[in-house]
Image (cartoon, helix red, strand yellow):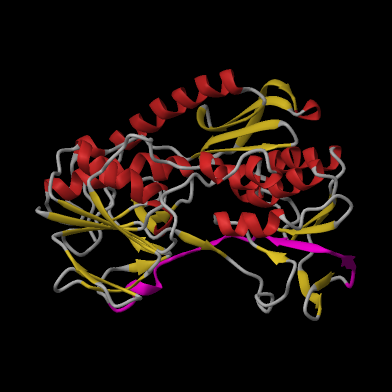
Amino acid sequence: MKSITVVGASLAGLYAAQALRQQGFDGELTIIGDELRRPYDRPPLSKDFLIGKIDTDVLSLEAADEDLYARWLLGSPAVSLDTASRAVVLADGTRVASDGIVLATGARARKLPGSAAMAGVHVLRTIDDALALRTELLPGARLVVIGAGFIGGEVAATAKKLGLDVTIVEAMATPLAGPLGAMMGTAVCGLHSANGVALRCGVGVRRLTGSDRVESVELVDGTVLPADVVVVGIGAIPNTEWLTGSGVALGNGVECDHQGRTNVPGIIAVGDCAAWHDFRLGRAHRVEHWTGAMERPAIAVAALLRGGGHGENHEEDRHACIPYFWSDQHGVRIQFAGHAAEADSVTIEDGSPENFCFLAVYRRGETPVAVLGMNQSRAFGRWRRQLRAVHSATLQSLPPVLER
């Protein structure tokens, strides 16, 4: 290939570009981004950046002396893809044709319907989101966080540290039941109660009240929570609409094989917008974890440069990338790796949930499938390596053929 375009200038896009150079691609490289900013680190946005401990200058993902010898086209999003000519069309009319394309357009925060024009209502995904929210997190203000996921939990913990009156509203009866399971989800969310954050679980939001600015959150059960600021943390939507009609297979994200190859030759997808084939599930599955955005671009880029068709099987590419994420809340490091949904038991191996310092192992039968740690980084690291070995052995034992 003589030219490759990376669509998306966040973590996965940057890592794809770096992998291209590291794997010997010396042709024309173009990187397209909808924001004007160069790639930056997002996890600190809900913590140290939001509290004002760090600023934008330390968020860059590029080393000071790094040069990918790329053409950067920033500030104009991709609006369509012509797969016949393999050309990306930008909102400003620019047309970029290349031999290979990396789709890394990420995902955007899901918003509460009808709240877009109301002041005081925020989502948190970008630096600009964080800058807008940061100015409103004033001591004594009343903050309602809608959604008890990790972003919501981190914002709640940060706001509490800043002196706000914080309430979390969660529609599910058990917070974090999806990623952690019901028992451990309850244990982790108990951290909020212990630090003075109010929790309202098992009840949805009916509407936000206020005219120009939000005044309260009305719940389905009739409860009205006064609010000066609202943060909506109810998940993310993959940025794939611009690919509609292009011929690239779409589902919940860009559907890919186990190496990130789409159904269109010469086009791969990585990061939050990509749904890679999961051998264990037997279908495409999209993950939004930061670690996946780091690990998968090198795999997909290798497949792109190697050539070959969608679904073509390479036994050496059965990687043991298990889901992993972490979160810092109220001074506690929470780490999780694996597949909680596969477990039929959970045991506490060390420590105590009551002290928010413990290690829990999820098992299916006798086989560990996931591990959760709170302030147990060393033990968690050992179990994560063990999980990776078990996961790798499992992948090798699965049927070798991937057909679509």
Does the rendering let one see residue 217?
A: no
Query: Is 92 included in the stretch rendered in magenta?
Result: no
Q: Residue at x 12, y 50 (%)?
A: 307
Between 19 and 234, which is closer to the camera in this rendering?
A: 19
As drawn, 270 above or below 218: above
Q: How many marks?
A: 0
Q: In which quadrant is the C terminus drawn?
A: bottom left
Query: Is 235 included in the stretch rendered in magenta?
Result: yes
As drawn, 347 above or below 276: above
Image position of 227 (left or right of 93): right
Between 224 and 184, which is closer to the camera in this rendering?
A: 224
**For residue 55, which quarter of the picture?**
top right
As drawn, 230 above or below 155: below
Magenta-colored span: 222-245
Image position of 38 (left or right of 59): left
Q: Residue at x 38, y 54 (%)?
A: 9
The x and y percentages for residue 31 are 29, 56
Between 295 and 231, which is closer to the camera in this rendering?
A: 231
The x and y percentages for residue 278 are 36, 49
Image position of 265 (left or right of 134): left
As drawn, 195 above or below 230: above
Does the rendering let one see residue 77?
A: yes
The x and y percentages for residue 263 are 22, 63
Q: Residue at x 39, y 68 (%)?
A: 240
The x and y percentages for residue 283 are 36, 56
**For residue 47, which quarter of the picture?**
top right
